[in-house]
């Protein structure tokens, strides 16, 4: 029984991991660049939420959408003002740019909040649980998981059934020529960066709701996001979901077998995947 | 009406076009001919704003030479690019639909394009990358037509098409010439076919215009000399 519970807890944690990966994967899929500041965007969003909820005292139901909007605006503006200028055939400038951003954000957070552990208080929801047979499941992890699944579903639907999604996929396929289809690729990139930043902030806030964070938590989140998309497979949003779920299960089982292991088994899994199936679990081998 | 004056085009430090100039009247088809590497695709790209170019390009009186590709497309420039450039994660239908993004009114619609290329109806829901080369070429032409362009740029569209289909495409293009003021620039490897299908022609050599004129009764010998850069003096 304890194993079923462990497995389910792994899945639920995996939903959060998948969200971390999804934002990074979108950026990579459309712009072919890695956003090194992804973890700091998540943690920065969470700290802003902590400031808004704990210090100003705004209720969480208001705080979360406000932070999501702000994150979206930040991502959009960042892309329009900075990253679009350095995008080109060389992946180094955007990489360095986002690396610089991650350091700036981290230092700002330390400056403003100190290095202490902090979390977002969700009250009774944090401890509520439901009993199914002998298994006890937390209501909040279940809720997070449902939100993650709903977001994956919504994104998939809009990629395939809206004009926005069609333009986004076309831009990812061939950014040079989409101008002739009436698409401004810099705007598409900015929308994607905004969406990615909002997803990052959401997963950061969820992380701060289920545990605690410090201004230094970003690096570890970036690593998880990278592992998720490599394990799952680059280039498809379902790769992120599968990668997240598998990584979540492996982390939870690893910690149960070997409480001192930390993220070790996740890293080992990454190595195995890179050796055995480098295109990822859900990835197609690249033919082009 | 398309007026090009003093057009230079660059890829980084490399200059592909030198002082290009020609005019094309509304409703006309212009054949752009020249050897491999002469700059035909570069000229089409610079009309679209896909190279860095300097000079004047006027479409129906409006200067478009400094506008971004998106705005030129909205003003009626449409390209069927060399090598087809399918959006590989889009279905055939989506590839066609995306051509209509600019929302320009006109005779071309999904129905009209599939009437021209019935096979595309059958494969509408397939990823465009799974079609054969010739079928992809039909999608590329259809996608360009969906924009209801004022200026249609066709870069080697008969490449990969069966001769009968190529003839059909030419015939279809000829038939819509009568009913609209659309201009077409046609890049073709087959010089005599290009001349036969056009009202006027421009011959490029190493990035420069070496000969232009009216297609009807054009001197194929002189074109041949210009094409290969032979001095006929
Ligand atoms: N993206 C590019 N970057 C750098 N140089 C280029 C690029 N595209 C074309 N060129 C160069 O510009 C010149 C003209 O090329 P272009 O493609 O316009 O020729 P073309 O007349 O279309 O030839 P073809 O009949 O082979 O298609 C060539 O010397 C080519 O090497
Ligand atoms: Mg060419």
Image (spheres, coloured by chain):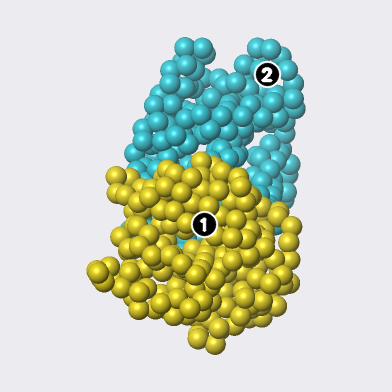
Chain colours: A cyan, B yellow
Q: Is A176 situated left or right of A157 in this image?
A: left
Q: Which residue is mark 2?
A: A53
| Residue lying at 71% horizontally and 14% vertically, measured from the top left | A57
Q: Secondary structure at mark 1?
A: strand
Does residue A195 show up?
yes
Q: Which residue is mark 1?
A: B23
Which residue is nearer to you in this view: B102 or B194?
B194
State the image coordinates of residue A205 (x, y, percent, origin top left): 61, 30
Q: Can the viewer see residue B73 in this picture?
A: no
**Residue that appears at 44% across and 44% down:** B55
Q: Position of residue A25 (x, y in %)?
A: 50, 47
Q: Is mark 2 within 8 Å of ligand 1?
A: no
In the rendered view, tell whether residue B82 sits above or below residue A182: below
A269 or A147, which lies in front? A147
Q: Is residue B224 left or right of residue B91?
A: left
- Nearer the observer, disc 2 or disc 1? 1
| Crowdedness near tag 1: few (<14), some (14–19) or many (≥20) residues, C-alpha within 10 Å | some
Q: How many marks?
A: 2
Residue shown at 74%/25% (left/top)?
A: A62
Mark 2 is surrounded, within 10 Å at the Cα level, by few (under 14), some (14 to 19) or many (20 or more) other residues, namely some
The residue sitting at 58% across, 51% down in the picture is: B59
């Amino acid at each position: 029984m304890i194993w079923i519970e462990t497995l389910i807890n792994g899945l639920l944690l995996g939903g959060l991991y998948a969200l971390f990966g999804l934002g990074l994967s979108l950026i990579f899929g459309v712009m072919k660049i890695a956003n090194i500041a992804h973890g700091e965007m998540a943690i920065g969003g969470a700290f802003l939420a902590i400031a808004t909820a704990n210090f100003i005292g705004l209720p969480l139901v208001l705080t979360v959408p406000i932070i999501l909007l702000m994150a979206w605006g930040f991502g959009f503006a960042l892309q329009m003002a900075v990253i679009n200028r350095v995008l080109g055939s060389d992946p180094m400038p955007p990489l360095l740019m986002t690396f610089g951003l991650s350091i700036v954000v981290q230092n700002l957070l330390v400056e403003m909040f100190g290095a202490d552990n902090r979390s977002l208080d969700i009250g009774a929801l944090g401890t509520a649980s439901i009993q199914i047979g002998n298994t006890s499941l937390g209501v909040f992890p279940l809720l997070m998981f449902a939100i993650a699944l709903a977001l994956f579903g919504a994104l998939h639907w809009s990629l395939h059934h809206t004009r926005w999604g069609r333009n986004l996929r076309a831009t990812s396929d061939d950014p040079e020529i989409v101008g002739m289809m009436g698409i401004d690729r810099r705007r598409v990139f900015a929308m994607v960066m905004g969406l990615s930043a909002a997803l990052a902030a959401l997963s950061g806030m969820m992380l701060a709701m289920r545990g605690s964070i410090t201004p230094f938590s970003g690096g570890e989140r970036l690593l998880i996001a990278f592992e998720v998309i490599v394990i799952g497979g680059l280039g498809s949003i379902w790769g992120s979901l599968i990668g997240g779920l598998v990584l979540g299960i492996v982390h939870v089982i690893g910690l149960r077998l070997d409480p001192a292991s930390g993220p070790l088994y996740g890293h080992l899994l990454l190595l195995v995947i890179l050796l055995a199936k480098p295109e990822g679990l859900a990835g197609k081998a690249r033919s082009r | 009406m398309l007026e090009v004056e003093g057009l230079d085009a660059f890829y980084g430090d490399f200059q592909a076009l030198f002082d290009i100039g020609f005019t094309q009247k509304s409703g006309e088809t212009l054949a752009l001919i020249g050897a491999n590497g002469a700059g035909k695709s570069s000229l089409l790209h610079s009309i679209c704003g896909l190279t860095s170019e300097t000079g004047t390009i006027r479409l129906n009186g409006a200067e478009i030479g400094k506008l971004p590709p998106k705005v030129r497309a909205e003003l009626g420039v449409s390209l069927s690019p060399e090598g087809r450039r399918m959006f590989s994660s889009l279905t055939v239908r989506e590839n066609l639909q995306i051509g209509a993004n600019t929302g320009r009114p006109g005779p071309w619609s999904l129905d009209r394009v599939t009437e021209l290329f019935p096979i595309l109806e059958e494969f509408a829901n397939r990823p465009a990358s799974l079609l054969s080369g010739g079928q992809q070429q039909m999608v590329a032409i259809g996608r360009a037509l969906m924009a209801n362009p004022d200026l249609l740029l066709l870069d080697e569209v008969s490449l990969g098409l069966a001769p009968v289909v190529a003839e059909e495409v030419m015939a279809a293009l000829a038939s819509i010439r009568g009913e609209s003021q659309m201009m077409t620039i046609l890049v073709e490897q087959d010089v005599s076919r290009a001349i036969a299908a056009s009202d006027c022609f421009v011959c490029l050599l190493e990035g420069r215009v070496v000969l232009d004129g009216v297609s009807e009764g054009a001197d194929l010998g002189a074109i041949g000399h210009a094409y290969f850069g032979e001095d006929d003096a």
